[in-house]
Every structure is written in C-alpha cells, then in structure tokens.
Image: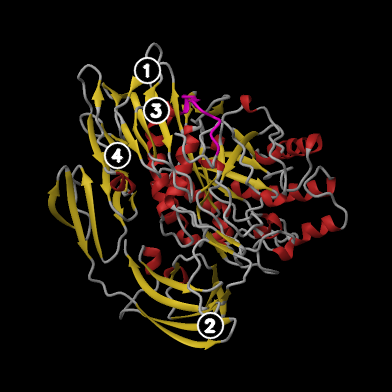
C-alpha cells in the first residue's frame, strides 16, 4: 500500500500526520557509479530521508538525438539503489537546472536553437517538442520507481529559478510552468509533490514553492568581504536575495506565502568556489544557519549540495559553467566538491556532522516540530547588529522549543550573560534556568517535552534522538551547559547526556535494537551488521553493549555507560614520494609516485578501503593528471585537497601542476598563502591517509 503525501499551509504531511523530512542533493552523474550505494548509505546515516538530484540534460543528450544512460549516467540503477538503501527521491527535471553546469544544463545544440530564434524556456512549440522527447527518455528510466508503483520517487521539481535566472516573468512565465506540469503528468511522472524554486521573483505556476539560503555568495562579483549574511537572522522572511545576485534580479516573491509551508531545497550544505571568489563554508556556518532556519519556522531542511562530486567528461566540450559560455563566473573544469557534507570522493566533513545533529532529531521528533509555528519576539534585528539577542519559540499551547543564535559568520557577537528563556504556554510561561550565551553559541532547548511516560519541564540541553528496543525508550540529549533537567510530577525518563563534541560524533544504528555509537568516523548499518570506517587505529563506544564484537575489534573496559571497542590495523599503508620536475613564472610541476604494499588489491576501494592523498599547496590553483589526462582540479582556498587514489583504482603515479598566484590577481581568498616576491607557486606537502572499513 502506498503512502499518502500532501501538505497544508504550514507543513508537509505523510499519511495525514505532520512530516518534517531532511533532503540532501546528490548528482549521480557527478560520481562513480560503483560507489553510489556506499554514498547513499552515508547520506541515510546522516539522518537524511529524501535524496534530490538534478537530471542534467547535457549529461544525457550532449549530441542531439544520442541519449546516454550508461555508467555514471544510469538513472535507473541509481533509483534502484535509492530504493534498496531506503531513501525517498525528488527528481529535479529541469529542463534548465543551472547547477554550475555548462549552459545551465542545456546541450549546446539547444542553445544553438535559441540563437536561431527558438524561444527557449517558453511554450514555443519547437522548444517544448524537444523537452517532451528528453522527458520521455527520463520517464522510461524512472518507470516503476514512482511512489504510486511502490517506488521511492515522491516528488518532481520543474525548471529552476525560472523567471529569476532566465526565462519569462509574469503571466507568460507562470503559463510556461503550468505547461511543464501538464507535460510531466501527461508523460507519466505521477508523484504527490510538484515543486518549483520560489526565490528572487521566480515563477512557480501551480507548484509548491521551495526556498534557499547560503552562508556566502561565491557568485557575487566583488572580491571583498561581504556584508553580514541575512541567513543568520531569525525571521519570517523566506527569500534570500543573495542567491544568483549576479543576475541582478530584485528581491521579490511571486506567490502568497500564507498559502504554503516554508520549505527549503537549497540551503547551502557548503559552497562551490569560483575562480574569483573562494569562501570556505565551515561546519559552524552550516550548523548555525540550519538552526536559524529551524528557529524561523521552516518545515523542510533541504541541502544543496549534500554530496559533492566531479563533472563527467564531455564528448564535445568540458561541462562546467564558465564565462566563455556566457556566465559571470568561472568554475573548476572537473571539481564539484562544494565543500559539501559528503565531499568530492566520499569523505565526510564537519558540515555533515553539524547537519546530523538536526537530522537525527527531526527523524525522531519531526512530527512534533513540524506542527509548531515560530513566534519571533524581535524581527527588527539586522545582520550587522552584533548586540541584540536573536531568539524565537516554536510552540503550541502546551509545549515547545526555545531557539537562540549568537553566531554571525566572520563576526564577533556580544556575549549575553544570565539569559532566562521563557517557553510560551497557555496560561503561564515556563522559565528556564539562567544561561550564559557566548559569541558563536546557537541551539535550542525543549520545554514540556513528552518523553515516554515522563514530561521534561525544561532543560539546558538539546534532544538528539530516541533509542528503542529495550524495556523503555532511552533519550539522547547533548550540550555543554549544566543541563538542569526538571520533570513534571517526579516521573523521569532514561537520558544519556553527551557533550556537543560527543554528539557530533554520535550515530544511531538500528540492529536488533537501536544502538548509540560514538565514533569520529562514519558508522552505519548494512544487512543487519554494524560497519565502521577508520584509520590504522579505531576506537568506538556503544550503548548498549553490542551482542557481537565487530570483526577486527577487541572489547575493552567500559567507559561509564558505554562499552568500548578498539581495532588495531597493522595493514601496511602506501608511501608517496614527490619530485619537482619543472617550474617557470606561471606554474610548477611535480610527479608523485605512490608505492603500495606487496600484494595490494586494486579493487580494495570497492570493498571499502581507500588511500587518500592529501595535497597542501600555495598557488592560484592546481591540476591533477593521470597518464596525461586531467582527472581533477582545484582553486586554492587554503584547505588541503583530498585525492582519493581508490577512486582511480590506485594509480602509481600522478602529475600535479600548481598554477601561480600573484598579489594583484583579481580574487577573493579568505586566507592568502605566504607570497615570495609577490608570488606563490609551490606544493607544500603530499601526505597519505589510509581509511579502512
């Protein structure tokens, strides 16, 4: 029996109940197909319930009439794996997607039709005939995987930023969006939810609008620090005027917000840098922004990107956005890392762990949170106000959550001493114990929260998840304040309290019951077994004790309530040797030779083992070559660049070309490298990091 999905003007619903999903974007065509399942499991382990993906036209029909759904373009296999892993799917059909792709995803031959007078992104009959033909192919790949057929696909997004970045505005634009929906339904895209991006004056037709927000704007045409970002302000304002501000469309909304829930599809899980602007999105940027959106009443946290990747190789051209194809920005030819929660080659980042704090909470308590509207005491606060307390309360007449955000990216906020939050209830308010909020603090606290048979009156701690499978449920909370749990009528629930750092490294793993696992590395369930990644030495803590000691681990003495397991991996690792082979004023070339241990299995990556080559350098950027072919590139940000040797079947030799950075280059870099005579062009180190399953 299929599940019923719907919405009202406040939240999404599943089988008639409030539903608060977390959505993460992954572009299957930008990742190696043999590793899709591993990545989808990482996405699910992070608490994500829906994976969204662009269908990028130029990736599937680069040559007119020649469709390619093979290899990394195999949509059908990808949907099969989403169903196997247990993730719902949103197909973002386009036909124009943007996505930092050449021509916004249009094949060159479609662009040429526009040059010859066809009105692209309109109801022009010629254009719509090609859209129909393309969507027919997509439908054939998707058939059998729609919710109505027992599959994972529950939603379709039509177009992207339509009327904001290209396309028509006003009634002509709305008519085109309606025509696309009619076509999608006619072709068989039978889904309960149809969405459209709604920011920046975009047209939505008859779709459900989804919004966005990024902690910075790499597409901005300046090379200076930007003004304080509005996405750290708790507010009922849904539109982020920074998105695609390089297209100079006014801050506008085309729909009545009171008729729709506040949903996001493009909260920046990171940032994709451009040649001229290279801000680095860090974990706390994403964590504070996400908490702020939750505090503002959002009913869907949707992240773009959640999983980074690499642009596939084109037959006729490279496939990245560039000034040469009419855009204001130059992007790396291959690298689409996005500094995402799951990065270019599958490693997890601090962004992943920050999002996980909210995702795990919403998976267990989202039905409650979704139905609670946000009451914001002061909506006059401006982003550059570093003095006022930013707070809100999501509540009904009986209970709720108080939110605070004292974080503003690249700013220092005033500390607020002995703050007493008050939960808003019918009749009387619930006062929390006083708490000190330092600059950079953000989070939320519950009041009158029902936990099994108990009611938590208040606590200076944040709920993370519920563990089921024992006699009674156990609830996991976290925070670095003295929690001061208070209860109604003396009835308490079983609580495990973690520090915030422990919570960032906490995983809920369903086996014969729910287990709480503490590990700095990625942990997940697969076929009923606990799987762990780590380095040479790996330590995990679990509650309760595991029924079977994981393979390769040894049980150690308990640590409080937690059972402790350690693994010593004596497997010999690889060694990298670096030789500079050439240098001139504009570049320096290095050969890196990798020596693997005797008997090394070149298929080890598919079994979970990887060897990461961590490159630290100073320059404008670098290119990575394997057997003369460029396999990756990078614009300098100050971060180490991870290259997965396993992704390329463990090559023995790579060539690195570092491009020179000059003091007068037109570029914004948050932390410039040391310059010698006004120039930087050097590979500083190449270190090996082994990862084992």
Asked whether residue 84 appears in the rendered view, the answer is no
Q: How much space separates mark 4 and mark 3, taking CA atoms?
A: 15 Å
- Name the residue beneath numbered marker 2: 588
- Residue 381 included in the magenta stretch of the image: yes
Residue 463's place in the image compared with 602, above or below, is above
Task: Between residue 396 and residue 15, name the one nearer to us.
Answer: 396
Label 3: few (<14), some (14–19) or many (≥20) C-alpha neighbours in 10 Å: many
Of all residues shown, which one is farthest toward the right?
117
Determine contact: label 4, label 1, CB under 8 Å.
no
Determine which residue is flagged by label 4: 478
Please report the bounds of the magenta region as a residue range. 370-382
Residue, disc 3: 401
Measure the alpha-carbon separation of dots 4 and 1. 24 Å
Q: Quick one: SS at disc 1? A: loop
Residue 659 sits in which quadrant?
A: bottom right
Disc 2 and disc 1: Cα gap in Å? 66 Å
Whichever of labels 1 and 3 marks the residue nearer the N terminus, that label is: 3
- Measure the C-alpha gap from mark 3 to mark 2: 55 Å
Q: Are marks 3 and 2 in contact (CB under 8 Å)?
A: no
Q: Does dot 3 land on a helix, a strand or a loop?
A: strand
């Amino acid at each position: 029996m299929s599940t019923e999905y719907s919405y009202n003007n406040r939240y999404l619903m599943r089988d008639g109940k409030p539903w608060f999903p977390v959505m993460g974007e992954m572009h299957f065509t930008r990742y190696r197909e043999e590793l899709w399942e591993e990545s989808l499991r990482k996405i699910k382990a992070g608490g994500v319930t829906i994976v969204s993906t662009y269908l990028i036209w130029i990736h599937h029909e680069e040559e007119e009439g020649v469709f390619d759904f093979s290899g990394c373009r195999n949509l059908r296999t990808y949907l099969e794996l989403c169903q196997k892993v247990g993730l719902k799917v949103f197909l973002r059909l386009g036909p124009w997607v943007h996505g930092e792709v050449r021509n916004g995803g249009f094949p060159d031959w479609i662009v040429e039709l526009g040059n010859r007078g066809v009105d692209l992104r309109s109801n022009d009959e010629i254009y719509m005939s090609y859209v129909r033909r393309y969507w027919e192919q997509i439908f054939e790949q998707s058939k059998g995987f729609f919710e109505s057929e027992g599959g994972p696909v529950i939603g379709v997004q039509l177009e992207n930023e339509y009327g904001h970045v290209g396309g028509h505005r006003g009634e002509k634009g709305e008519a085109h969006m309606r025509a696309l929906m009619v076509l999608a339904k006619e072709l068989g895209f039978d889904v309960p939810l149809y969405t459209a991006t709604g920011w920046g004056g975009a047209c939505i037709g008859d779709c459900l609008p989804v919004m966005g927000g990024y902690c910075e704007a790499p597409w901005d045409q300046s090379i200076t620090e930007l003004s304080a970002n509005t996405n750290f302000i708790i507010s009922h304002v849904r539109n982020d005027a920074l998105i695609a501000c390089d297209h100079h469309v006014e801050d506008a909304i085309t729909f009545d917000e009171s008729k729709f829930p506040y949903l996001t599809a493009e909260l920046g899980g990171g940032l994709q840098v451009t040649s001229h602007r290279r801000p680095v999105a860090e974990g706390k940027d994403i964590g504070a922004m996400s908490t702020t959106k939750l505090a503002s009443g959002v009913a869907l946290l949707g992240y773009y990107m959640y999983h980074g990747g690499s642009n596939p190789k084109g037959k006729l051209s490279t496939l990245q956005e560039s000034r040469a194809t009419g855009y204001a920005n130059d992007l790396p030819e291959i690298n689409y890392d996005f500094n995402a929660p799951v990065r270019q080659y599958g490693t997890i980042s601090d962004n992943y762990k920050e999002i996980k704090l909210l995702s795990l909470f919403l998976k267990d308590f989202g039905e409650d949170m979704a139905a609670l509207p946000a009451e914001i005491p002061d909506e006059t606060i401006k982003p550059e106000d570093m003095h006022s307390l930013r707070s809100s309360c999501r509540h009904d007449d009986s209970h709720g959550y108080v939110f605070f955000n004292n974080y503003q990216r690249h700013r220092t906020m005033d500390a607020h001493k002995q703050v007493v939050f008050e939960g808003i209830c019918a009749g009387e308010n619930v006062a929390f114990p006083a708490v000190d909020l330092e600059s950079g603090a953000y989070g939320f606290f519950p009041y009158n929260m029902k936990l099994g048979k108990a009611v938590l009156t208040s606590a200076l701690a944040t709920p993370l998840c519920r563990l089921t499978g024992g006699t009674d449920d156990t609830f996991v909370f976290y925070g670095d304040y003295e929690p001061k749990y208070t209860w109604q009528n003396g009835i308490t629930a079983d609580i495990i309290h973690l520090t915030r750092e422990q919570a960032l490294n906490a995983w809920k793993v369903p086996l014969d019951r729910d287990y709480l696992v503490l590990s700095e590395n990625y942990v997940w369930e697969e076929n009923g077994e606990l799987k762990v990644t780590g380095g040479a030495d790996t330590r995990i803590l679990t509650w309760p004790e595991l029924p079977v000691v994981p393979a390769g681990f040894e049980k150690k003495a308990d640590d409080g309530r937690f059972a402790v397991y350690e693994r010593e991996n004596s497997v010999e690792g690889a060694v990298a040797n670096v030789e500079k082979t050439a240098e001139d004023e504009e570049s320096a070339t290095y050969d890196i030779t990798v020596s693997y241990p005797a008997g090394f299995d070149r298929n080890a990556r598919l079994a979970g083992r990887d060897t990461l080559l961590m490159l630290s350098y100073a320059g404008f950027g670098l290119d990575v070559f394997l057997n003369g072919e460029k396999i990756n590139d990078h614009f300098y940000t100050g971060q180490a660049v991870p290259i997965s040797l396993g992704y390329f079947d463990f090559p023995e030799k790579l060539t690195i070309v570092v491009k020179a950075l000059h003091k007068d280059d037109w570029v914004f870099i948050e932390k410039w490298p040391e310059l010698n005579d006004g120039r930087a062009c050097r590979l500083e180190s190449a270190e090996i990091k082994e990862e084992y399953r």
